[in-house]
Image (cartoon, rainbow, N blue to C red):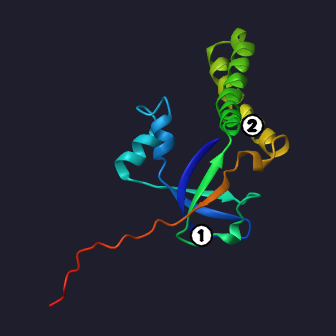
Amino acid sequence: MLREIGRVVAVETASVWVETIPSSLCGKCAARAGCGQGIVSRTTGHRGLVQAVESATVRAQDCRVDDEVEIELPEAAVLKGSMLVYLAPLLFGITAVLLAQPYGEFATVMSFALGLGVGFLFVRMVTTRVFPRQSFEPRLSARVPPKPIEANSAVIARQ
């Protein structure tokens, strides 16, 4: 499971919107040096906004704005999503190129573009009909208890 801690910014009926800084996941990723998401978040300080659905352990109605929550996403969902989004359109495009090779260079280029488009349509169809949307959505896994505020022993008098 991939886990991230974030701050609740909005609560809906069965989900919450969580603002995260993808630092813990970016530190573990092998592509962290060349990843566009990591570079953008480091340079701009941009935080990600994620909609997390409720789980059996944490309900959305139990969360309040500014609560810290832990969200999780199964690693299998990331793997399936990557395979679908990247590999399927590429395979459709390459297959179209191999079929159109005898018809010339222009037909090869056009068939790759057409195959790529058909591949994206295939991905759209598979994700709406075969895989349920819930398998790709992050889930609430825990509410993080608030950290106690420690009072400083030195008292500053106002004048």
For the residue pair 68 and 39, the one nearer the viewer reads as: 68
SS at mark 2 in the image:
helix
Q: Amino acid at mark 1?
A: Ala
Determine which of the numbered discs, if any, sits on residue 21 in the image: none
**Percent position of residue 47, x then y:** 46, 55
Is 32 displayed left or right of 107 in the figure? Answer: left
Q: How many marks?
A: 2
Residue 12 at least partly seen: no
Is 59 displayed left or right of 132 in the figure? Answer: left
Where the N terminus falls, by quadrant?
top right
Q: Which residue is mark 1?
A: 10
Determine the image quadrant of residue 77: top right
Determine which of the numbered discs, if any, sits on residue 123 in the image: 2
> Which residue is situated farthest in the right direction here?
129
Residue at image point 38% right, 46% down: 42
Residue at image point 76% right, 50% down: 134
For the residue pair 119 and 112, the one nearer the viewer reads as: 119
Whichever of callouts 1 and 2 sits on the residue coming sooner in the sequence is 1
Q: Amino acid at mark 2?
A: Val
**Percent position of residue 97, x then y:** 69, 17
Q: Are marks 1 and 2 in contact (CB under 8 Å)?
A: no
For the residue pair 99 and 68, the one nearer the viewer reads as: 68
Instruction: Give the spatial CA distance, label 1 vs label 2.
Output: 30 Å
Up/down of 114 relative to 137, above or below: above
Residue at image point 14% right, 91% down: 159
> Which residue is situated farthest in the front direction here?
153
**Percent position of residue 157, x then y:** 19, 86
> Which residue is situated farthest in the left direction here?
159
